[in-house]
Amino acid sequence: MAKKIAVFPGSFDPFTLGHHSVLTRALPLFDEVVVAIGKNTMKNCFFSIDERIELIESVYRNEPKVRVEAYDGLTIDFCRQIGAEFMLRGIRTVADFEYECAISQMNHLMRPGVETVFLLTTPELTPVNSTIVRDILSYGGDVSQFVPASMDINGVLNKRKKK
């Protein structure tokens, strides 16, 4: 039987409790989940790709079913490259669903063998999103209640200052 691999794509700038909830709840469904950090040159990111990889890996260091990779190009092409037959997406709102549904349908047209699996965000995490967390960070605010406890954002920021 083929290994069930899912790609969980995003910018994850930063990885939030919402992402963590979706990924943790998806683990029983798949043999492996690849957290795929897309390189988007049009987006001004707070954390570098390497910092985001480090932060997410710190959360899942003891979970062999999770790996973190960066990729360029279309997510659907990345799925093909690594042999993933599933794409994992978290849904917070109806607007998220409409957007993700359109992308899923386009992906299906380009590569029919990849199915998108949607998981709803838990109600208490619905307002948490990377954009707001990034804004809080940019003003020096405390984001500890919005990110996984094992994610050492301050450690990454301190390393950055020392460079």
Image (cartoon, helix red, strand yellow):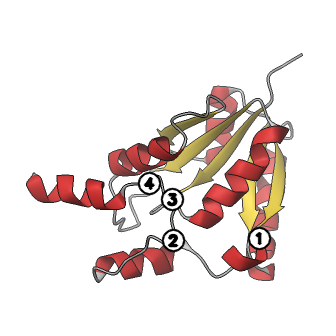
Instruction: State which quadrant residue 20 falls in.
Output: bottom right
Q: Give the residue number, with chain letter if any, for mark 1.
A: 122
Which tag is nearer the camera, tag 2 or tag 1? 1
**Who's the residue at 54% across and 64% down the image?**
16
Whole-number angstrom distance, CA of label 3 to CA of label 1: 18 Å
Whether residue 51 sits left or right of residue 84 in the image: it is left
Q: Which mark is residue 130?
A: 2
Return the residue at label 4: 151
Q: Is residue 111 visible?
A: no
Per the image, label 1 sits on a secondary structure element best described as loop
Mark before the other along the chain sequence, 3 or 4? 3
Secondary structure beneath dot 2 equals helix
Q: Position of residue 73 (x, y in %)?
A: 53, 46
Residue at which label 3 appears: 12
The residue mark sitting in front, 2 or 4, is 4
**Could you tell which of marks 3 and 2 lies nearer the N-terminus?**
3
